[in-house]
């Protein structure tokens, strides 16, 4: 049996306390699917990749892929490979520092298979 996706990386959600995560905190669960979007015009990080949660048709910017981890992701978005990643919450730890509260797992989708 072929895998539907291949593990790419684990990382934490950076900048969580500066964006919309508190607005939807009670909606976030392990396994929640998130969308990744490139933000090439980010003045603080030219490799920035946003992490977005869509709830009831509204997008909430939860934070970013951490600097360093985003360097391997941003080139894919720059080449218009925008739908190849599956990003999900793999750990939520509200008692930890805000920068460590949400862990993400990013997988590469197998061609022709949507998750």
Image (tube, rainbow, N blue to C red):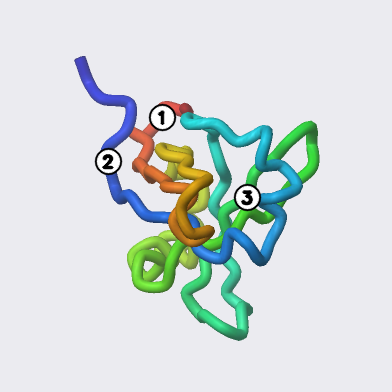
7 lies left or right of 53: left
Query: Gap in Å between the C-alphas at discs 1 and 3?
Result: 23 Å
The kind of secondary structure element at disc 2 is strand
> Which quadrant of the view contains residue 58?
top right
The answer to whether marks 3 and 2 mark residues whose Cβ atoms lie closer than 8 Å is: no
Q: Earlier in the sequence, mark 3 or mark 2?
A: 2
42 lies left or right of 96: right
Residue 76 vertical position relative to residue 2 in the rendered view, above or below: below
Q: Earlier in the sequence, mark 1 or mark 2?
A: 2
Query: Gap in Å between the C-alphas at discs 3 and 2?
Result: 20 Å
Query: Label 2: few (<14), some or many (≥20) within 10 Å?
Result: few
Q: Position of residue 100 (x, y in %)?
A: 44, 56
Query: Label 3: few (<14), some or many (≥20) within 10 Å?
Result: many
Quarter of the image that includes the N terminus: top left
Q: Nearer the viewer, residue 96 or 6?
A: 96
Residue 14 vertical position relative to residue 36 in the rendered view, above or below: below
Q: Nearer the viewer, residue 92 or 8?
A: 92
Query: Gap in Å between the C-alphas at discs 1 and 2?
Result: 17 Å
Q: Earlier in the sequence, mark 1 or mark 3?
A: 3
Residue at the spot of label 2: 7
> Which quadrant of the view contains residue 17?
bottom right
Residue at the spot of label 1: 112
28 lies left or right of 101: right
Residue at the spot of label 3: 52
The kind of secondary structure element at disc 1 is loop
**Foreground: disc 1 or disc 3:** 3
Tell me which residue sits at (42%, 46%) in the image: 104
The kind of secondary structure element at disc 3 is strand
Tell me which residue sits at (54%, 35%) in the image: 33
Q: Nearer the viewer, residue 85 or 32?
A: 32
**Foreground: disc 1 or disc 2:** 2
């Amino acid at each position: 049996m072929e895998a539907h996706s291949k593990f790419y990386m684990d990382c934490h959600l950076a900048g969580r306390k500066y964006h919309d995560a508190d607005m939807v905190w009670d909606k976030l669960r392990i396994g929640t699917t998130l969308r990744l979007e490139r933000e090439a015009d980010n003045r603080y990080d030219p490799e920035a990749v946003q992490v977005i949660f869509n709830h009831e048709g509204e997008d909430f910017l939860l934070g970013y892929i951490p600097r360093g981890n985003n360097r391997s992701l941003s080139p894919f978005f720059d080449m218009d490979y925008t739908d190849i990643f599956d990003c999900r919450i793999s750990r939520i730890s509200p008692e930890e520092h805000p920068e460590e509260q949400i862990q993400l797992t990013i997988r590469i989708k197998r061609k022709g298979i949507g998750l």
